[in-house]
Amino acid sequence: MTFTVMTFAPVQGFIERSRKLRDLYGSSFILSHLARALCEAGQSELGGADTLVSPALINVTQGTPNQIILAGNFPEIQGRRALLKAWKEIVDQCRTWIEAQIPAEYTWKRHWELWGNHAWEFFWGQGETITAAREEINRAKRSRDWVGINWQGESSTLSGADAIAWPGLGRKRDSRDIRLGEDDREIREFYKKLQSLTVLGEAFVDATEQLSIPELIKRLVTYHVVAKRIGIQGEVPDSFRDIKLREQRTFWFAGDGDKIGEYFRQLKENGQDESTALRQFSQAMLEWGENTLKPAVDGKLGRIVYAGGDDFLGVLYPADTHAFSPQASLAWFYERFPQIWRQHGQDIKVSVGAVLAGKQVPQRDILQQAREAEKSAKKQGRDRIALRVLFNGGNHIEWVCPWDFLPPIFANYHDRDNGKNWTHIYNDVAVLASRRGLASPAVAFALFEVYFGAENRQTLEQNPSHYIGTASVSDWVNNLAQVGFQLCSNT
């Protein structure tokens, strides 16, 4: 039996360049749409739904995993064509819609075509088993074939990485005849017209925004009038006005299942068919994201941006529909999330990076910090959460703890007055650190006992490597005090 594995890149980079939640949704819509196109092309060529091993296709706009596994020989050239066809359709629909809404002398078509041809890398591999096919595609990823797109003029005000999209982009002229002031006037007039498009229902851009072609595409696909031209329907939010990211702190979280490859190897060793097990796993995880995780968060605590199987990203935030506090968000992670995770029925653990971000932290930095926190949770032993506090200046503090130790710690915390004031431990740690007293493990354990009880200290001392990971007990207690103070302090 031949198995074919396909994927494309960049994925995380495409997501993390999003500066607004609307753009983040757009990134997720596009990635899922492209993955679905590959799935449908493979099924059409190989003849039937049974040929698609992973991902399971359910009615999900956000979250279709971007690694496609097919049972059969699906040629590389057909996979590449399917990816480019789906992406070029998105590009062309966005461009032609803008041109229809805002009449002008457009010279930008060639730049849109360049983005249509060179936005993605496609990877393909085959093998007699799924494991062999995955190993082949991993080898293919070591060789890159990337094409950069050059331009003349100013860069996007969001990313600074690509050219501003405007009607005069690509206009042929001598560089000596370029008048940046005139270009700037035309660009500002174009974006004022975009901002005033009432057909979208909401202001398309802010007054200070001048977007690149990929950023325009991400933004446009989140509006129903454009999304339906492409085939993205059903999950585009009607509005993003309830999320006041620039006015309030937000709690972002990124999660990923632990040791999935090892999980499948164990199933195979126990006699289960690899493709059947993977198909069932994919179906269970996608249904969990759609039917369990999203309803538990959306409209109640925040929003799930995407849930692609065991990989997910979400944000908790204040809104008119629900209250928000860092302390309540923390409680949700240790009281509710473990039960929510187990409902998919698969015997796997999860590592999560959760970031409480300051009001002025750019979204791109938050997303990067959330992924780094998730990696930190895995590095410290997996099956745990990394709680990170990200300040406006870019500095952060982090504390990592297994899921099973979170409730005993935060439920049993008491200050010297038998209350819940985290200022006490925060100040004690600061004083001890200034005198290098916390460097002693004995002092760190004693301080931990004072505020969290003798039983928790005994638990910690019996198996420190499990609960603390690779950190020292002194650093672990110090970070606990600082993160706990930021998340739980009422002062």
Image (cartoon, rainbow, N blue to C red):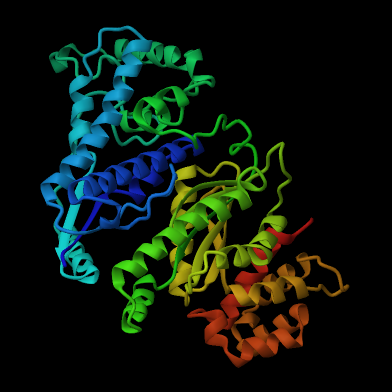
Who is closer to the viewer here, 214 or 445?
214
State the image coordinates of residue 220 (x, y, percent, origin top left).
41, 27
State the image coordinates of residue 466 (x, y, percent, origin top left).
53, 84
Residue 59 drawn above or below residue 157 = below
Q: Is residue 310 visible?
A: no
Residue 62 drawn above or below residue 400 = above
State the image coordinates of residue 105 (x, y, percent, origin top left).
25, 7
Q: Is residue 313 shown left or right of residue 241?
A: left
State the image coordinates of residue 279 (x, y, percent, origin top left).
36, 63
- Classify the position of the N terminus by image quarter: bottom left
- Classify the position of the C terminus by image quarter: bottom right
Q: Is residue 214 visible?
A: yes
Q: Residue at x 68, y 90 (%)?
A: 458
Who is closer to the viewer here, 372 or 444?
372
Q: Residue at x 13, y 51 (%)?
A: 76
Q: Is residue 234 shown left or right of residue 71?
A: right
